[in-house]
Image (cartoon, coloured by chain):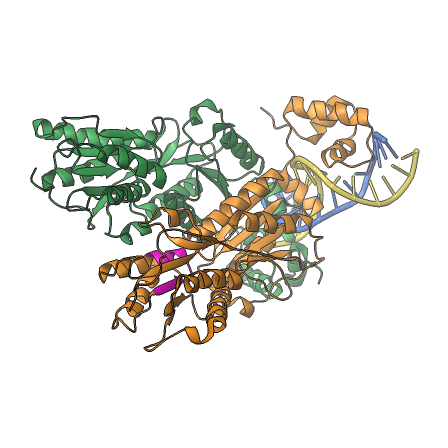
Chain colours: A orange, B green, C blue, D yellow
DNA sequence: TTGAAAGCGCTAACAG
DNA sequence: CTGTTAGCGCTTTCAA
């Protein structure tokens, strides 16, 4: 079965390869009739253009790179999955890469993608992203945070967290612990600000007689658990009555810590997470969490890449609102 | 900044483009000295060969496709992540695609990958995979199950499950429920066989006075939960004292069901999962599970693709052993 | 509007 | 061992 090429199509249709190419690329200057005839032949022969050849001439690969810190994180895997769906709908495919939050690895991956001539990169930057310099003219959409000089799609972490913390305040909580993300993570800091916003706004109502209520740590289960242990292993009147965790994974780890310490949730401790991953509704009890619109983020990121003029650096920026998803890990605090 | 091409390198090194190409491809017939000199220039100029041009001539894209049913499933996302790591080490990149277990979508994706001229596909087949016909000569490694006619890498589901069920038997359990995967899923059926093996081998020791102890359902949390509900919502002497779930997600859903019914785990119910995803060690209590060697599977799959002669259809097959990871969801049954 | 022809950047014969 | 050269399959001027 000799591979069918554009010449075969041209020959059979009695036209030049140029015309076939124009049909393929929806070039306006082709007669309706001719277009139809050629399309017919293409169909008939089951011809598909060779992407390499195409990309070589036209500098368009219909390939999008996506670099995330960790595919094991449900938030990111859902992001990738959504992006793949949207991209496929437009004839684009996705190359995934994991940076493990290493700037060096990230730089290497970006280089690979560049030389692959991807049409754009969806990037969840590592914390040291600023240390690497990018090849110019490559469309990049930063996701999960906004960065000056780049197009960016993210959810409004700050106000999202504020929403969650205010919910706890409204329930009557006054000693609210906060499990934050890594010190240098931008989204982590945005979330922390949301917490501080809410607490400040609540003003004198907030009490904190003991050690600090804010723990800085990684976003994973285990970190959430040890942070929870730290926050909860103190005298009852110093112990927070509620904890807001910067990720659902942390929140679930924290639930584990509470359980280990014999602290009932939500009776003696309310917990709120952040992200809204599917698992959050399957914990026992179901986690109250602030939900990010992951699919929207993915769709918007792809859209920016497909829309943006190459090297136009339009700096599209979108911030999506988060929404509170009430579960069973929150309740009014017990009287002291 | 005019893009640096192979001719620039050749000119600066005072050799022909042919020689540069040979250096690039580690062709043996190049002098040590020349190789060194050319490599130096390449480095200096920061030259990277254009993959499209390369692929067009050589029919090698250094691209591997990976198609899985659902990236949201932690087992698969870890698989993809591992594969990406290994592939990158060899200069290969990964195109991910999700089939959502739809044969039609799967066929479409395979077609896309084929026309992209990927060097191979790592495929977790959908349940209706047999209905689609493949373009010949495309190296495919089937993962998570073995299929006649294809190279395949999987873990030994059957013996893995047997291991887990035998562990429960050894603890003294006699009414052991089984949450199975989808009816037409091959891995699901392999696991079911492992359960039947163990139960049969245990012989008369096994009792089942009531409704069937086997539930067929999807692999996700919610399915595990409702299956658990079904198995546990019966009179005490008919209720299983232990449940083996075919996935960790099911197991976690089942824990939730037990909790909702007020059945303490492991005191009144032992639960064992399958997969060994990271989350399994963060549940409360920690899940006892049968662990698949995911990274080994991914590495082996990539290795097969990189090794296998194109169209040689060597039919490499590897079955990895699973291992029991003891958590806190298992204990001896309460006396009736 | 369409055809002819010139490459895109590289690899692989084929010479030398 | 190295240089020369002919394309890979397509897109895109340039003419017609």
Left or right placement of residue B180 versus residue A72 in this view: left
Quadrant position of residue B240: top left
Q: Quadrant of the C terminus of chain B?
A: top left
Q: Quadrant of the N terminus of chain B?
A: bottom right
Quadrant position of residue A48: top right
Left or right placement of residue B214 versus residue B167 in this view: right
Left or right placement of residue A317 versus residue A189 in this view: right
B72 inside magenta stretch: no
Q: Position of residue B273 (x, y in %)?
A: 26, 42
Identify whether B222 is placed above or below A123.
Answer: above
Quadrant position of residue B130: top left
Q: Is residue B322 visible?
A: no
Q: Position of residue A213 (x, y in %)?
A: 36, 72
Residue at x 19%, y 46% (from the top left corner): B264
How many numbered callouts?
Answer: 0
Return the residue nearer the eye: B276 or B27. Answer: B276
Residue at x 34%, y 58% (from the top left corner): A221
Identify whether B312 is placed above or below B94.
Answer: above
Return the residue nearer the eye: B286 or B27. Answer: B286
Q: Residue furthest front?
A: A335
Identify whether A320 is placed above or below B110.
Answer: below
Return the residue nearer the eye: B288 or B91. Answer: B288
Q: Is residue B238 visible?
A: yes
Magenta residues?
A: A242-252
A250 inside magenta stretch: yes
Return the residue nearer the eye: D9 or A62. Answer: A62
């Amino acid at each position: 079965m000799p591979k069918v090429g554009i010449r075969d199509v041209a020959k059979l249709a009695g036209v030049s390869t140029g015309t076939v190419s124009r049909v393929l690329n929806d070039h306006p200057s082709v007669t309706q009739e001719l277009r139809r005839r050629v399309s017919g032949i293409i169909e008939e022969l089951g011809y598909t253009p060779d992407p390499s050849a195409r990309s070589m001439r036209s500098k368009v690969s219909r390939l999008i790179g996506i670099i995330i810190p960790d595919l094991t994180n449900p938030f990111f895997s859902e992001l990738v999955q959504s992006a793949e769906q949207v991209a496929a709908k437009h004839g684009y495919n996705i190359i995934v890469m994991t940076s493990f939050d290493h700037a060096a690895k990230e730089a290497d991956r970006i280089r690979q993608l560049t030389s692959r001539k991807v049409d754009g990169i969806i990037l969840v930057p590592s914390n040291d992203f600023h240390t690497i310099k990018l090849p110019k003219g490559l469309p990049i959409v930063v996701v999960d945070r906004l960065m000056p000089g780049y197009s960016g799609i993210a959810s409004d972490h700050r106000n999202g967290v504020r929403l969650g913390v205010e919910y706890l305040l409204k329930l009557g909580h006054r000693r609210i612990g906060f499990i934050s993300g890594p010190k240098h993570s931008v989204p982590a800091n945005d979330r922390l600000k949301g917490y501080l916003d809410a607490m400040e706004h609540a003003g004198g109502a907030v009490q904190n007689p003991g050690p600090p209520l804010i723990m800085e740590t990684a976003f994973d289960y285990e970190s959430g658990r040890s942070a929870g242990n730290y926050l909860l292993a103190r005298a009852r009147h110093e112990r927070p009555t509620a904890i807001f965790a910067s990720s659902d994974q942390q929140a679930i780890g924290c639930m584990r810590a509470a359980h280990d310490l014999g602290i009932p949730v939500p009776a003696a401790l309310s917990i709120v997470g952040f992200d809204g991953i599917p698992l959050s509704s399957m914990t026992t009890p179901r986690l109250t969490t602030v939900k990010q619109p992951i699919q929207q983020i993915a769709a918007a990121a792809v859209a920016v890449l497909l829309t943006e003029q190459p090297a136009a650096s339009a700096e599209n920026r979108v911030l999506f609102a988060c929404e509170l998803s009430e579960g069973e890990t929150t309740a009014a605090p017990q009287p002291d």
